[in-house]
Image (cartoon, rainbow, N blue to C red):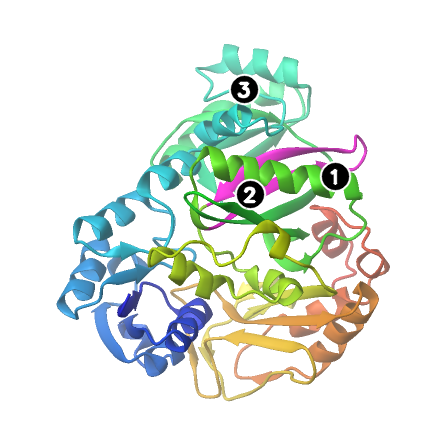
Amino acid sequence: MRKLLVANRGEIAVRVIRAARELGIGTVAVYSEADQDALHVKLADERVLIGPPAASRSYLNMDAIVTAAVDLGADAVHPGYGFLSERAEFAEKVAAARLTFVGPSAKTIRLMGDKARARSAAEAAGVPTVPGSNGPVDGVAEALAEAEQAGYPVAVKAAAGGGGRGIRVVADAAELTEALPVAMAEAQAAFGSGLVYIERFVPNARHIEVQVFGDGQNFVHLGERECSMQRRRQKVIEEAGAPGLPEHVRTEMTEAAVALAKVSGYSGAGTVEFLYDPARGEFYFIEMNTRIQVEHPVTEMVTGRDLVREQLTVASGAPLSFAQPDVAFRGHAIEVRLNAENPDFGFMPSPGAISSMRLPGGPFVRIDSGFGPGSEVSPFYDSLLAKIVVWAEDRPAAVARMARALDEVEIEGVATTAGFLRRVTDVAEFREGRYHTTFLEEWIAGGAGK
């Protein structure tokens, strides 16, 4: 690999460019008209304009991105996360242009991108799945039968959904009868497929994911991450490892994740997501994300391994640089997503120019950001300003370090979630690791988040 085009923007584009530079790989940044002064554009060796601000006409324009890669002599494309990272068609277009796609094969992306097929693959690998239908349901009668067997409440999920979208929870048969056609129409509009499937809904569940890596022949895990602190099914705070998770559950979960990677012949970085039911002591497969995750830094902090660097070397044809016995875990890491949003007004996005910006520093504090003083926060894209990541020898020390780091944040020009996140670090349930996927929304609804 000599020259890499980064098909993304913001902090993940910056992250990939930095890893490539350390490996001596040239970089190409793509950018929209809204991002011409963005940090990732400034850091890359070369840059190319690919369209107007709207993502559909720039960062989601497959042909424009592949053409740019070919025209500038790139031999590889890194999709980052979001945008085109899990689009099998994009991976195929990259391969058809004789370029290396930094990620798994289009076949693997397509398999894991279809939640129903991914569930079947998990069952074939012996990985526990949430009780429910084995695939998309064909009409109300089948949905009712599957729900009865799984046990209410159940979730109606879009087969082509993801990222917490395309999900409806129903309490009984009457609600399911009414919700099913609506859910199918929503799935068709949002994901281009109206197929839905049924799963048991687990109250007070925890969302735990396992980082896996493969080179097509060798497969390893790099531990688990706790991702239960969520708002509208979007992650807000992540940790490595998961606080209070029984050791035997951790072992079984990580082994299951590796088994799924093996079944799919996985190559590159991937994340297997699970739902953990503390009441039953059971875990269930949710989905596999076939890309680098937003929260990958917490895994890097506790393992000391550069996951993006490993992505690039494996995509270049090298075998994994480590085996499972080489993976050691030390300490605890926490990441918060600092967004340009106003918590006092329903977390409304706050686009605009950043007039001043001071982010925290100090021992074992990492900042991943694509912004700085004078940067423009565009209304066209995700509102993520920065990821603040801390590490410490144990979890209480990591929580204290995160609280201190958030106290140092000073940003003017746009509203941010810094104060909100700082308040969360003082909540007893968070400090004691006693939270679940609906805790944060319940806390906010109770008025405690202000």
- Look at 76% across and 69% down and name the residue there: 398
The residue located at (41%, 44%) in the rendering is 216
Q: Above or below — where is 16 with respect to 441?
A: below
Mark 3 or mark 2, which is nearer the start of the sequence? 3
The quarter of the rendered structure image containing the C terminus is: bottom right
Q: Which residue is mark 1?
A: 249
- Secondary structure beneath disc 1? helix
* N-term mark: 1 or 2: 1
Camera-nearest label, 3 or 1: 1
* Cα distance between the residues tagged 1 and 2: 15 Å
Instruction: Tell me which numbered mark, 3 or 1, is placed earlier along the sequence.
Output: 3
Question: What's under tag 2, amino acid-wise?
Answer: Val
Mark 3, residue position? 133
What span is in magenta? 269-289
* Image x and y of residue 387, in percent: 57, 70
Q: Residue 393: image x %, image y %? A: 78, 69
